[in-house]
Amino acid sequence: MTQLDVLYRYGVPPTEASVVAMAKMREVYGVRHLALDEAKKTIRVEFDATRLTEPVIYELLRRAGLDIVETMPMFAPPAPPPEPVVAS
């Protein structure tokens, strides 16, 4: 089993019907965990990559009625190193 996470940002908050449909996604073999963050308007899906792919997860969320705006990076890139200070 290869566990992967994907993070999406959504636009319109999910309706009650979409939340119920997303909860039923757990019944799909390979979907392990869903985490909705209302403050950041994101949803993180943990899935088994040997069973599903990221485009399948995207389509499952769209069919559930979630307004996906973009795929987000899971981690922020490291900050660039500071510029060296040259003494004059």
Image (cartoon, rainbow, N blue to C red):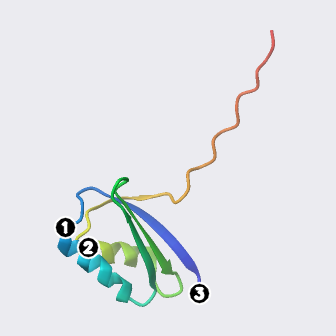
The numbered dot on residue 1 is: 3
Front of the two marks 3 and 1: 1
Circles 2 and 1: CB distance less than 8 Å? yes
Query: Which residue has dot 2 on it?
Result: 19
The numbered dot on residue 15 is: 1
State the image quarter where residue 22 is shown.
bottom left
**Residue positioned 79% across, 17% down in the render:** 86
Would you say 81 lies left or right of 13 here?
right
- Label 1 residue SS: loop
Would you say 87 lies left or right of 72 here?
right
Amino acid type at circle 3 is Met
State the image quarter where residue 58 is shown.
bottom left
Residue pushed farthest right? 87
Amino acid type at circle 1 is Thr
Query: Where residue 62 appears, x then y in whole percent?
Result: 27, 71
Calculate the distance from the C-alpha at mark 2 to the C-alpha at mark 3.
Answer: 27 Å
- Label 3 residue SS: loop
- Label 2 residue SS: helix
Calculate the distance from the C-alpha at mark 2 to the C-alpha at mark 1.
Answer: 6 Å
**Residue positioned 36% across, 89% down in the render:** 27
**Residue positioned 35% across, 53% down in the render:** 39
Amino acid type at circle 2 is Val
As rendered, which of 17 and 82 lies closer to the eye?
17
